[in-house]
Amino acid sequence: MASPAASTRRSPDSSSAGSLRPSKSNDRLAISVDTLVNHLLVSKRSLSSMTLVLRADEIVRAARQSHEDTVMLAAQTGFLRNAIADQVVILGRVGKSLQATCEWGKKDFVQLVKRMDQVDGELEGTMNMLRTTAVGTALRPKSEARKSLLDFVDEGSVHGMRDAMKQCIKELQGIQLSFDGDLLRLETDIRNIKKIIDNAPTPAPQETITKLLVEIFEHSATMAECLASLTQHFDMCVTAIRTTEGAAALARRKAAEVTQSQGGESVSISGVIAEQESNRSDLEPQTAEDRAEMLRVVIQDARLVDGVVQDIQDHLAQVEGKNAALGDQTDLTRKAHLGMLDAYATLGEIGDRLADYLAAEEDFKTRWEMEKEVVFTKLEEMKQMREFYEGYASAYHGLLIEVARRRTVEDKVQAILRKAQESVDKMLETDRAERETFRQEVGEFLPTDLWADMQGPAKRWKIVEVGDNGQEAAEGFADANLSGN
C-alpha cells in the first residue's frame, strides 16, 4: 500500500482513471460516493487485524522470555555436562586402578597355584618313591607281608597339608570374588551414568533458537507495518469521506445497515469522522490536485487491502509456527537439563559409594597379603615334610648298609667261634684220651673217694649270645664240652 507521503502528493506518472477529482466541465466526481463509502467500510473491517497483531505481540513477549529461559538452561546444562564428564573421567581412572589391582591379583593367584602345584608335585614324587621302595625281608619277620617304606609313614599329615592348601585356594578365590563384585558394581555405576548422559538430548543450538526468535520478531514487525498501512489507508478513506459532500451521512447510514444485516460486530465510523472534523489531520488536501492525488491513492490502496489482511494472517501463521518450533527447541533444552540433573543425582550417589570402592581395594590387598603369608607358611611346611621323607628314604639306605655291616661282623664272630670250637674239641678229645689212659694205668690202685673228681666227666663250656639285659639268647653260637674221670 502507499506510504503516508504518497497520499499528500500527486504522482507525475499516475493515471486519472479510478481517481476521485472534480470534472473540468461540470465538476462531477470521477468516483461514486457509494464506492468511496464501500472502501471506507472495507478499510474499517480490515482494522480488526489488530487482534492478530496483538496476538503476535503476545507471542513475541513469550518467545523472548522463553529464549531467556532457554539460554539460562542451556548454560546450566553445558556446565553440568562438562562437570559430570570430568567426574566420569575421574571415576574411569579409579575403575582402571581397581581393574589393575584385580588383574594383579589374578596373575598372582596363578603364580601361587603354580608354586603350590610344584611343591605338591615334589612331595608326591617323594611319596611315590617311598611307596615303591620295598622294605628288605631281612628286616622284617618272615611271616609278615611285604611292606614299603610308605607303610611306616603317617599319610594323614600329608592329606591334612593338602586340604589346608585347598582351603587357602578357596580363601584366595573368595577374596578375589568379593573384589570382583566391588569392581563390577563400580563399572556398572560408570556405565549407568554414561548411559544417562548419552540418552539425555543435546540442547538445541543457540544459533537455531536465536534465528527462530529473530524471524518471529521480523514477522511481528512486518505485521505491525501492515497494520500501520491499513490504519493509514483507513485515515485516508475517512478524510476522503469527510471532504466529500454527503459522503459522511451515507457512510454512517451504510455502517448501520451493515451492522444490522450481518448481526455481527458493529461497524462504527461516526466517532472517527467526528474526531477528524475536530482535529485536522496531515492528510487533509490543500488543493484540488492534492485531493485528486489522495483519491487516486485511496482507490489504488483499496485494491490491496484484502492482500494486506491476508499477509497479516500469513505472518501470524509464520509467527505461530516459528514459536511452536521455538517451543520444541525449548522443550528439548529442558529435557537436556533434566537429563543432566538426573546424571548429577546419580553421580552424587556414586560419590557416596566411591569411598567403599577405594576401601574395598585396600581391603583386598590386605587380605590377599595375609592369605599369601599363610600359603607361604604351608608351602614351607610341605617343603620340610618332603625333606623329612627324603631323609627317611636316605636313612633307610643307610640302614641297609648298617645291617650288612652287622651281618659281616656276626659272620666274622661266628667264624672265630667255629675255629675256637674246633680247637676246644681237639683239646677235649686229647683230654678224654689222657683220662682214659690214666684210669687204665693207676685207676685200680687209687680209691675212688680219694678225689671226688677222679671219676667225674670232663667239664663243658658253652658260648651264648647275651642281650642288653644280660639274659641269654634263645640260641647260642657254640657249645664246648669237657669230661674227665
Image: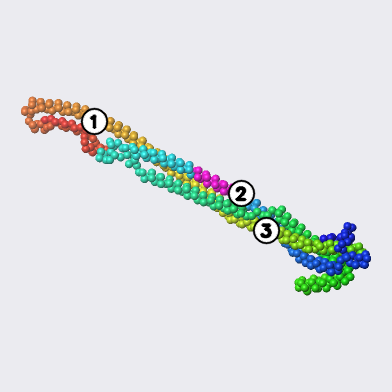
Name the side, left or right, on which 144 lies relative to 335.
left
Label 3 Cα neighbours within 10 Å, binned few <14 / some 14-19 / many ≥20: some
Label 2 Cα neighbours within 10 Å, binned few <14 / some 14-19 / many ≥20: few
Name the quadrant of the C terminus. top left
- Secondary structure category for the residue under label 2: helix
Give me the residue at 58% from left, 53% from top.
192
**Image position, residue 291 (x, y; %):** 89, 64
**Image position, residue 5 (x, y; %):** 87, 60
Check residue 91 for magenta coloring: yes
CA gap between label 3 and label 2 equals 32 Å
What number is the disc on residue 414? 1
Q: Which residue is mark 2?
A: 89
- Secondary structure category for the residue under label 3: helix
Q: Which residue is mark 3?
A: 328
- Residue stretch in magenta: 87-108
Name the side, left or right, on which 99 lies relative to 206.
left
Front: mark 3 or 1: 3
Check residue 153 for magenta coloring: no
Name the quadrant of the N terminus. bottom right
Front: mark 1 or 2: 2
Residue nearer the viewer, 446 or 125: 125
What number is the disc on residue 455? none
